[in-house]
């Protein structure tokens, strides 16, 4: 039976170490979160981010804008946050309302304040091996992985999914750690066979329980990024969260595995605050 990689406990430890470091600083790291519109899920995510920022002793700048905000108004806000020295990190909550051009908004964020790691400059820095801010979920995957395997050199990692948000940055981070990385996607042939060659398997697809137990190499480490809401079998009419991995059968074969929920999910917000601290230290030392 696989060891469970407890992302909730790891994230709690990470947050507490960030809070300890914040206490030692002569300034308060500041995180600005921008929410446009009333999307219910986004409001919950933003609420959690603001609450955690304050709990860690950081400064929170919360901008809730109406759904009819124009591109020009949002660009002006991002530029003002870029220019504000008390703001070290800027996050624009996605998705934005359809009339807004998210690419232009995101790429207006100063890359040194891009705590979500979503600008083209951040992606380029990661690909080029330059110091920069790495998007939160991929960073969370790497930290969980390094906690169970401190030296990843030479291991074969299979990443399923090639999105700019998760798959590509995860693959770049693993390459930097000297893994041999294979990226799989919807056109990959014999995905199950490929997965069976993976010492490290990271599905980031968004298909409930797609990865079966017999896709997994015995003893492999499985980091399940997928978050999928499906109907609950026990409670008709209710839903439950599952990952991209068929957890019960995979846990019989894998060496170590993240659960869903409680695996990668809690790491994302912890890494956002870690990135805010990193950005603050770099910006303050550059002054
Ligand atoms: P995207 O939809 O942007 O990308 C999904 C990727 O999966 C694509 O590259 C796609 O391939 C690939 N894919 C789709 N179907 C298959 C298939 N049958 N076989 C192999 N590959 C397939 O999703 P994201 O990267 O944004 O997110 C992936 C998952 O991670 C989602 O469940 C999301 O909810 C979750 N997530 C979790 C986070 C967390 O905090 N834990 C944060 C962000 C995301 P192709 O490119 O060929 O279409």
Image (cartoon, rainbow, N blue to C red):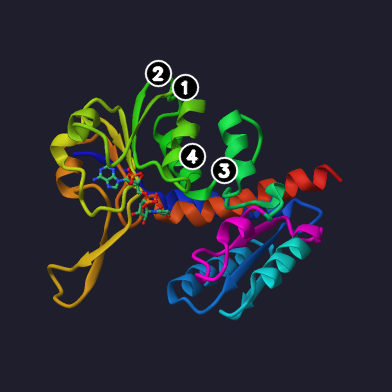
Q: Whole-Å distance between the Cαs marked 1 and 4? A: 14 Å
Residue 188 circle label: none
The residue carrying mark 1 is 178
Q: Residue at x 60, y 44 (%)?
A: 120
**Is residue 117 covered in magenta?**
no
> Which of marks 3 and 2 precedes in the sequence?
3
Q: Which dot marks residue 169?
A: 4
Which segment is the magenta one? 82-107
Q: Residues within 10 Å of mark 1 (few under 14, many from 20)?
A: some
Residue tagged 2 = 154
The answer to whether mark 1 and mark 2 are in CB contact below 8 A is yes
Q: Nearer the viewer, mark 2 or mark 4?
A: 4
- Horizontal and vertical percent for residue 140? 47, 45
Q: Are marks 2 and 4 in contact (CB under 8 Å)?
A: no
Residue 219 point in image, percent of width and height: 23, 29
Image coordinates for residue 204, horizontal then vertical, percent? 35, 46
Q: Is mark 1 within 8 Å of ligand 1?
A: no
Mark 3 or mark 4: which comes first in sequence? 3
Q: Within the image, what quadrant is residue 37 found in? A: bottom right
Q: Nearer the viewer, residue 138 or 29?
A: 138
């Amino acid at each position: 039976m696989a060891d469970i990689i407890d992302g909730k406990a790891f994230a709690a430890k990470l947050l507490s170490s960030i809070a300890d470091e914040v206490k030692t600083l002569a300034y308060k790291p500041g995180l600005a979160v921008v929410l446009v519109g009333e999307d219910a899920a986004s409001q919950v995510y933003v609420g959690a981010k603001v609450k955690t920022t304050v709990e860690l002793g950081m400064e929170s700048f919360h901008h809730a804008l109406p759904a009819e905000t124009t591109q020009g108004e949002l660009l002006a806000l991002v530029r003002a946050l870029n220019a504000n020295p008390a703001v070290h990190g800027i996050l624009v909550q996605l998705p934005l309302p359809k009339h807004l051009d998210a690419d232009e908004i995101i790429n207006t964020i100063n890359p040194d304040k891009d705590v979500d790691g979503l600008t083209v400059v951040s992606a380029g820095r990661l690909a080029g091996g330059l110091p920069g801010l790495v998007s939160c979920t991929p960073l969370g995957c790497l930290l969980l992985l390094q906690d169970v395997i401190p030296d990843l050199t030479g291991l074969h990692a299979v990443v399923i999914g090639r999105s700019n948000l998760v798959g590509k940055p995860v693959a770049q981070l693993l390459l930097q750690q000297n893994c041999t990385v294979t990226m799989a996607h919807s056109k990959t042939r014999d995905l199950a066979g490929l997965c069976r060659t993976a010492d490290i398997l990271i599905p980031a697809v968004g298909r409930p329980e797609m990865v079966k137990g017999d896709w997994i190499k015995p003893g492999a480490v499985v980091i399940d990024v997928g978050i999928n809401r499906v109907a609950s079998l026990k409670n008709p009419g209710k839903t439950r969260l599952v990952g991209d991995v068929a957890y019960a059968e995979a846990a019989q074969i894998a060496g170590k595995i993240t659960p869903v929920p409680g695996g990668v999910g809690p790491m994302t917000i912890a890494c956002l605050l870690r990135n805010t601290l990193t950005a603050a230290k770099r910006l303050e030392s550059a002054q």
